Image (cartoon, rainbow, N blue to C red):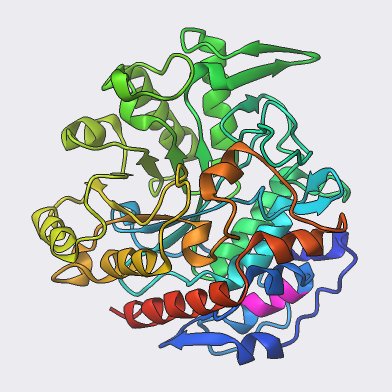
Amino acid sequence: MNYVNELLTKLGQNIKLSKDKWTIENQFVSGIKKWVGNITPSQLLKRNIKQAVESIVTLCECYTFYEQFPDIIETPNYGDKWGVRANYIEINNRAIAEMHKNRCKNGILSTIKILPAIPPSAKSWANCIILSQIFPNIYGDGYNKAYNEENSIYGIKLNTDYSLNIIDYDISMSPSHQFHAFNDIAHFHGLKTGFRTVISADQIKIVKGESEELFDWKNNEHVEIFINEHVKLINTGFEAIFIDSAKHIGGYDMENYTGVGALPEYEQMQHILNELRKRSGKTTLSFVGEKSTGDFNRYKNLGLTSGTAFIEPDNYDEVKHWSMKLKYEKEYSPGIEISNDNDEGGRSYEQRLNRIHNALFAYEYPSDKLPSFMQTEDLFPLRYDTSTHHLMMCNPSYSINGTPESHWENLFAKDDGKEYNRKVSELFVHAQNL
């Protein structure tokens, strides 16, 4: 089924595609790899979905232009262990959703619109988009709130529909088909895709009809729901899951645990990850563990593919040292963070650019590259008075007139953000064909 054509049709847009002049004028080219750069996100977010699809097709690595979106799209093929070398880029799809006065909606459409500005996967490794929100958040889902009023992405509901912040519920297209369309567009652009999940029991609620109950890892029914909910998403095309608080699974290093509630036991999480692979039938899944540092065998045997926050990202020589030391690790590898979801802001553009440089170039051979982890702000700087973590914890609208366009215009840095984005694109230009 052609999910992209279904989406265009449901939105009242024609499925016949044309080359996009604006994309050609703003594209960065590295061999056959193309994306738009030297932009602010609002330039893309103000476009409609058909323009976004035309932009993606215009950027195609192929040598023919598709006048209709293809029926069959394959995920970029980097083998089963692609996640050990990937660049993971988390996009806060709630923050870039449409803010209509106090309502928040259609984050999946906004993410489609911004895809042309994400560099596609390189010759030697994959770039993977991680979506911050898929499931409904526990409090205030579908609404933006005051600047400092909590509306956390870290509390989710399972066994119900998907987030009102993310899915377009105004069109007669199922959420699963909308996820399929997103994944097909991302895959066509040469990107892998994934999503964030939480495992702290008191941050999860199970919906049963009109009632809700707190998640319990000792409740077999709850565990089955957890597995099935994630398999359903994997079956729409996602291949990576970022697991919040993964370091502490099985009660490890609990003195530094900042989540709320019990975590799965080690053997239980082994079972869950194995079931996700088995039930989905996908051998390519990548499981990324937050702060999974120290005992690498512990995380590898758990079933994780990579982990964050082990290697000093500002030191080129140290990153290169560890890339050489870990070059033969094909099952699990720790990576470097440009930034993470707890980033409170304040880091200079120069430091961010240096970290991206080290992530993309600190190795002896491209096949030795370590995985890296970055946030929306590392590609598209936010306005000065907010941060990645603030947007994970709260959901303010920055619109001055109650429209989505005003929110997008004011969420991100402007002229300096555009210049920074140009410099990021130039770094990727030099890395794409290594």
Residue 2 visible in the current orientation: no
Position of 6 compared to 198: left or right? right
Magenta stretch, residue numbers: 51-56
Q: Which one is in front, 271 or 399?
A: 399
At 71% across and 38% down in the image, what residue appears? 163
Up the image or down, 265 lies above or below 168; here it is above
Give the total number of marks visible in the rendering. 0
Q: Quadrant of residue 104?
A: top right
Expressed as whole percent of the image width and height from the top left, the position of residue 217 reads 47, 13
The C terminus appears in which quarter of the rendering?
bottom left
Q: Is residue 55 magenta?
A: yes
Q: Residue at x 68, y 55 (%)?
A: 96
Can the viewer see residue 270 in this picture?
yes
- Residue 92 horizontal/vertical position (percent): 59, 50
Name which quarter of the figure residue 327 lies in: bottom left
Q: Residue furthest top?
A: 218
Q: Main secondary structure of the magenta part?
A: helix
Residue 189 in the figure: left or right of residue 346 = right
Q: As drawn, is 216 to the left or to the right of 269?
A: right
- Residue lying at 37% horizontally and 42% vertically, measured from the top left: 288
Q: Residue at x 37, y 70 (%)?
A: 350
The location of residue 381, given as percent across then percent down, is 54, 64
Magenta span contains residue 361 = no
Q: Is 106 located above or below residue 405 in the figure?
A: above
